[in-house]
Amino acid sequence: MTESATPKPYNLLRSFSVLSLLSIVAISAISAALLARFLRDNLLQRDAVVTMQFVQGIAQTQNTSVYFTEQNYAEGKGPLTDFFNHIAHMPDVVRANVYSRQRIVLWSNEEHMIGQQFKDDNPELDRALAGELALETGQVDHPAKSEHILFDPEVDRFVENYIPIRDPRGGEVVGVVEIYKLPRVLMQTIAKGTRLVWLNALLGGALIYGALFWIVRRASLTIQCQQQALVEAGKWAAIGELAAAVAHSLRNPLASIRSSAELAREEENPATREYLSDIVTKVDELEKWARELLIYFYQPGDTQTTAPVATVLQAALSSFARRAQNQRIQVELALAEPLPTVHGDPQLLVQALNSLIANALEAMPDGGRLRIGGERRGDRFTLHLSDTGAGISPERLAEVFTPLITHKPRGLGVGLALARRIAQRYGGQLELRSQPGQGTTASLQLPIAR
């Protein structure tokens, strides 16, 4: 039976980026289109109402409605001509037609159309004859009705208003005035308003998308950090259990080693007595370190504990003095006196330095130089440990502080992770800089105790 494939982790930021972008673009486009259409229709309707009020006002003043019912159109031509010449010379008007109820053109500024009857489908004319203001707009170069003619205007759209003329005595519709306009200013205003609507939709959508993207990105990063913290917490819990088991298992062997060394030291052999005393001392240090490590994992203690840098550094270097001599490694101290006192437990800081020095010595198996320097900036003191080893590749450098991950044959992947954890416990930081072939520099930064 084949193993089921591991599900890929859900990418919240990518899913949100795509779906929210599509949603905001769709909503912004639909809203802009509706607002632009609303703006255009309302401006055209308002222009038509103003024109109708003007035309109907003149018609009532001059009582021109009586000429719409004249059977002899020639008799009403004079008054109609005087009335509609005013209309024909209105701004943007390129043609005006006057229809009777029988759809016959009673007057037009195009004389060849006078007397013609248009029976083809014209819903706007039908609505005007029914007493309703009607308007139509369209492309100039696409005439939709037989009474339309082509012009060569500066704008590409026309507006056609059908205005009903009523008998002031009975109120019934006696005729219709058709005004064919090329409203340049109105169309420019509509175009400008449409551009503003689309620009506002674009900027508003971009602002909303940017704000939501920033919020979700922060949330995604927070979730990732929390996930990493949970994973790291699980690893540290495993390390704590492992440390407890190791410390418990080492207590009896260490006690036996110490007892044997003490018994052997009582013999009259001055040549070996010094080495046996050294064994007893190291066993005591190892037992104390194991106890301190367990206390740190399960009861971290007071973060205000202080430690002199000189004492901590001396204790760490003394543990590796013989090993550095055997590997022909020169330890160079470049520290300005006096060294400050920093926040941190002395034993734990010694352990952190032990990990850094041990890594430096392992990087120089054939000899080299370990330079230890320090600098004080404000309320921070930083120790720099630089070796001349082979260096670390960028891929490995990115995961050196991850617990239980190591590239050493005999490593556990705990030393550097624990050293950084100790530094962070007391408000400090541990950083590693390295280039392949150029060595490695570890920077242990700690707050100075005042």
Image (spheres, grey):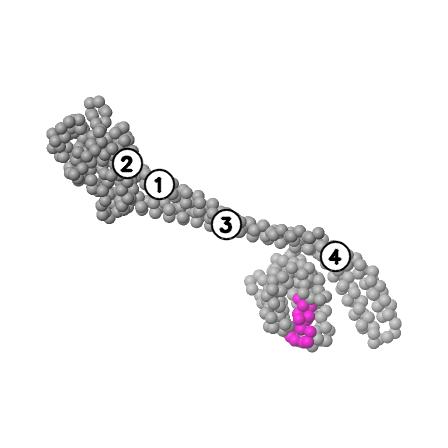
Mark 1 residue type: Arg
Q: What's the CA distance linking mark 1 and mark 2?
A: 15 Å
Name the residue at 44% across, 47% down.
25
Mark 1 vs 2: CB contact within 8 A: no
Give the numbered dot on residue 135: 2
Q: Is residue 53 above or below residue 259?
A: above
Q: Earlier in the sequence, mark 3 or mark 2?
A: 3
User: Around disc 4, counting alpha carbons within 10 Å, would you say few (fewer than 14), some (14 to 19), or many (20 or more)?
Assistant: few
Q: Is residue 367 magenta?
A: yes
Of residues 415 and 209, the one drawn nearer to the viewer in this rendering? 209
If you read the primary sequence from the N terminus, does the residue marked by circle 4 or circle 3 appear first?
3
- Mark 3 sits on what residue? 18
Q: Position of residue 31 (x, y in %)?
A: 40, 42
Amino acid type, label 2: Leu
| Residue at mark 1 | 37
**3D distance between C-alphas at marks 3 and 2:** 43 Å
Asked if residue 241 lies left or right of residue 377, the reply is: right
Alpha carbon distance from label 4 to label 2: 87 Å
Q: Mark 1 against mark 2, which lies toward the viewer?
A: 2
Q: Position of residue 120 (x, y in %)?
A: 26, 34
Which numbered circle lies on residue 242?
4
In the rendered structure, are the residues bearing label 4 and label 3 in contact, judged by CB atoms less than 8 Å apart? no
Q: Which residues are drawn in magenta?
A: 356-370
Q: Amino acid at mark 3?
A: Val
Query: Whole-Å distance between the Cαs marked 1 and 3?
Result: 28 Å
Q: Amino acid at mark 4?
A: Leu
